[in-house]
Image (tube, helix red, strand yellow):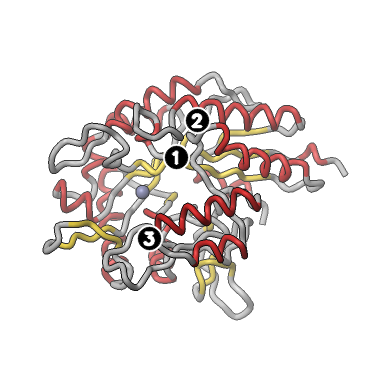
Amino acid sequence: MDDKAKTLYIVIGCDTDPDRQGFIDIIPGNKLSWRGMTEGIPDTKLAVMDIKDSGGKSPVFTWLMRADDQINIIYGAYNWVLENYKGLIEDLEKTGDEIGWHPHFYKHNDKHGIWYQELKDVSWQCRMLESAHKSFGEIFPGKPRSVRTGWLYHNNETMKKLDELGLKIDFSAVPGLRTNPVKKIKFHYNIYDWFSTGKECYHPSEADYRRAAREGERELSILEVPNFTSHSWFWGMVSGFYMAGKMKDPVQIIQAIRKPTFWVSLSAGRKWFSPIIKSLAKELRRPTESDIFFITYFHPDELIENRSKIYNRDNLKRNLKSIINLSDRLEIPHRYIRAEDIPLLISE
Ligand SMILES: [Zn+2]
């Protein structure tokens, strides 16, 4: 079998969130800080320019911009980020990048003065998506076409709403991972469920966003494109124990035993990113002619000086180089693409 016919397509998505408190040293008063975006993104574009794909093209990115209720409450407009940083965004688009959407389901609790993830009020979630989407299109008509939701969250109604709004690609899925709302915790964060999802792209069933439609079920037009994960047993367990601590939920360990899954940012240190590279090598060596879509992610505050010992711009550059070198070694052509290019490349 001639396995050289296949191509590795690399999609680099960035959840363009504000700088995270505790991650970056200086966070000004009651506003959000966007240094990762304004400083980190242009610097990184320059830093990776020389890491070309086999078509001689520099990396392209899919920048997923925040437009949601939190932005609306803090700045008075859903599309504030798009309007305020329009120049920067247009410059990125000129280099071939895509501008997509990263809506968080943040709701504010005035009594406790905190932001939390709204999980129960589905009609609020859908109304919020509708308003934010409309507002996005006022600054960038016809956009967004691609989306990854905040904390990867979905339910059947939010997926249906994105489909109805005309979004072409959702790449929130992280196959094998799930976090559960713990009863004793009142305000939730970081809740999502992709435990049963497989690694192939699919058009979600109206009856269950986590899988393709079965006979008799309606299929949505939007394409779900899963992120690339490693199923290394060791790293899956590392992730399970870490998540058990973070989410205060021992069930995370049981889930990791059932489905060891590891997912990490493109800006993570060599040790942390190596399981992803190993799994990609395995995938590239499979004797099949199907193309491979390698979907990865990072956050802008990982690109500037930060308190973490794991995430930085140099790591991102090195990891990207490792992907290209691996693909070259295996003589598999590689191409950087935007998320919105995926449907055109998938033969149905
Ligand atoms: Zn986010």
**Disc 3 to disc 1, how far (Cα)?**
26 Å
Q: Amino acid at mark 2?
A: Leu
Image coords of residue 88 (percent x, y): 31, 29
32 over 313 or under it: above or below: below
Among the two numbered marks 3 and 2 on one chain, the one whose residue lies closer to the N terminus: 3
Q: Identify which residue is drawn at 43% across, 64% down.
A: 249
For the residues labelled 3 and 2, say whether their Cβ atoms are less than 8 Å apart.
Answer: no
Q: Identify which residue is drawn at 30% across, 61% down.
A: 117
Residue 332 visible at all: yes
Q: Nearer the viewer, mark 3 or mark 1?
A: 1
Task: For mark 2, give the secondary structure.
Answer: helix
Residue that extends furthest to the right in the rendered view of this protein: 1
For the residues labelled 2 and 1, say whether their Cβ atoms are less than 8 Å apart.
Answer: yes
Q: Which residue is mark 1?
A: 298
Image coords of residue 186 (percent x, y): 27, 68
Q: Nearer the viewer, residue 245 or 345?
A: 245
**Disc 3 to disc 2, how far (Cα)?**
33 Å
Task: For mark 3, give the secondary structure.
Answer: loop
| Residue 195, picture quadrant | bottom right
Q: Identify which residue is drawn at 43% across, 62% down.
A: 192
Q: Which residue is mark 2?
A: 316
Q: Which residue is mark 3?
A: 165
Q: Nearer the viewer, mark 3 or mark 2?
A: 2
Task: For mark 1, give the secondary structure.
Answer: strand
